[in-house]
Image (tube, grey):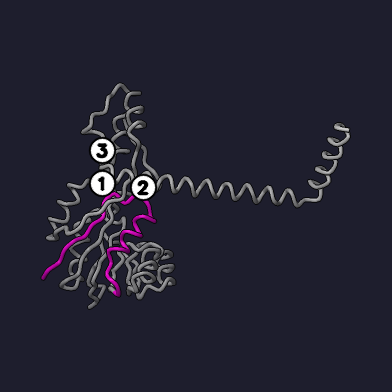
Amino acid sequence: MSKYAEQSVVLEDRNSSTAMIVGLVPMSARVLDVGCSTGYLGEALKRERLARVWGIELDESDAEKARERGFEQVITADLDTFAWEALDAHEFDVVVFADVLEHLKRPGDAIRGAMRRLTPEGHVIASIPNIAHLSIRVELMEGGFAYENLGLLDDTHLKYFTKKTIEDMFQATGLSIQQLEATFYDLPEDRVTERLRAVGLEPTPQFLQPIPLREKAVMEHARLTAELASAAAEVARLRARIDRIERMPLYRMARSVRNALRGGRNA
């Protein structure tokens, strides 16, 4: 039986993670969304890939929202104790672990359980944060790090992964990695250098691990595009406020008085 794992590493925000996963799922696939939350990913898969989607979710209120989004079935369960036989005879073309495995005590067991529900040509897609990300290494060089509500240092994470330990985990389950993608958050080298020099350190090329110029250009374009969109939104907001003020009778009256006073002074 041929099974393989496709994983996406260093997926740092929900939008980029969702878009990348959706692009990996075949059209009309039967998908098991493990740790499906409120069903935002499954909804995108149904809309863009015409997928049939089942889910597993710990929180019953989130599971109910996923059902409302059109999931065929959502099982409420703790993945660390889940009995995969509860899926009955269902088989899936794709099993997705979207930012889930790092929250489990035994992520390898969850992958093995999912494997039993894959079709012979089925595959696993997982998005997993990378604890070796440059931003985390800089914080450690500064003497520590702070847990967060979301992101790479989510305070609900039980496991932390690097590219190497991700590869080891999937190899231990008997799966081979066929495709590995990444989304990047480019921490500018000048900021890295500045922060490290503040604690008496000098970064080396090996520490900075420069990203190829082509990818840097793509990231810089994306960053500037986002900034431009934000600036355009702010300009539109300010114009709308100006328009509202200019339509106010009191403003028009004040402007007429000001113009009359200016005219008197110029006479």
Whether label 2 touches label 3, CB < 8 Å: no
Where is residue 97 drawn, in percent x and y?
Answer: 28, 60
Residue at the bottom extreme, as displayed: 89
Image: magenta residue range:
1-28
Q: CA distance from mark 1 to mark 3?
A: 23 Å
Mark 2 closeness class: few <14, some 14–19, many ≥20 residues within 10 Å: some
Nearer to us: label 2 or label 3: 3
What residue would you read off at disc 1? Answer: 160
Q: CA distance from mark 2 to mark 1?
A: 12 Å
Whether label 2 touches label 1, CB < 8 Å: no
Where is residue 42 drawn, in percent x and y?
Answer: 36, 67
Residue 151 disc label: 2
Mark 3 closeness class: few <14, some 14–19, many ≥20 residues within 10 Å: few
Look at the picture and state if 51 lies above or below 239.
below
Instruction: Report the quarter where the N terminus lies.
Output: bottom left
Look at the picture and state if 21 lies above or below 188.
below
Labels 2 and 3: the sequence-earlier one = 2
Identify which residue is drawn at 23% across, 71% down. Answer: 93
Identify which residue is drawn at 77% across, 51% down. Answer: 248
Nearer to us: label 1 or label 3: 3
Q: CA distance from mark 2 to mark 3?
A: 22 Å
What residue would you read off at disc 3? Answer: 210
Whether label 1 touches label 3, CB < 8 Å: no
